Amino acid sequence: GGLRLTGRYGIETKFVAQPKRGKSICSHHGQRKLPTIIYDAAKDTRYVDDVFVVGPPYTRFFIGAPLLPSSLYVGTLCLMDPRPRDFFSLSDCQILQEATQKISTI
């Protein structure tokens, strides 16, 4: 299977390439239990060729937190922005973690 954008705001699916599983900025974070923050993906050598970076939605800032119901990785809750950022607060990370926990119980 490929990447699936289940819920989205501000991203039109018709403009987003659907990469194969494991081939997208969103899919590299299942090994971690904490959020992954990338402040400027265009400057990160791991992601400069990523379809979400070089094409729509032209992701620069990315944060992804794994969805782990019963400790089984099922996906990633991602926030992406076409503008790079230089800060994401600890309280913002805690809100994201709380959201992943709530989603994982559904």
Image: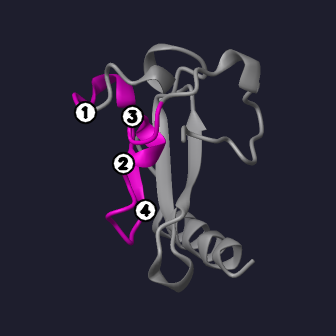
Tell how many labels: 4
Measure how far apart labels 3 and 2 are at the Cα level. Answer: 8 Å
Looking at the rendered image, the disc whose residue lies closer to the viewer, 4 or 3, is: 3
Q: Nearer the viewer, mark 3 or mark 2?
A: 3
Residue shown at 47%/75% (left/top)?
72
Q: Do the CB atoms of the residues marked 4 and 3 lie less than 8 Å apart?
A: no
SS for dot 2: loop
Residue at 39% across, 69% down: 34
Alpha-carbon span between mark 1 and mark 4: 17 Å
What residue lies at 69% left-to-right and 82% top-to-bottom?
105
Q: Which residue is mark 3?
A: 23
User: Of helix, strand and loop, which one carries label 4?
Assistant: loop
Residue 5 visible from this viewpoint: yes
In the picture, measured across the screen, residue 3 lies left or right of residue 53, that is right
Q: Amino acid at mark 1?
A: Arg
Give the Cα distance between marks 2 and 1.
10 Å
Quadrant assignment for the N terminus: top right
Q: Alpha carbon of mark 3 to alpha carbon of mark 1: how far?
A: 11 Å
Q: Is residue 21 left or right of residue 12?
A: left
Q: Earlier in the sequence, mark 2 or mark 1?
A: 2
Which residue, as the protein is rendered here, is positioned at the far left? 45
The magenta-colored residue range is: 20-45
Mark carried by residue 73: none
Name the residue that disc number 2 marks.
28
Quadrant position of residue 54: top left
Residue topped by disc 1: 46
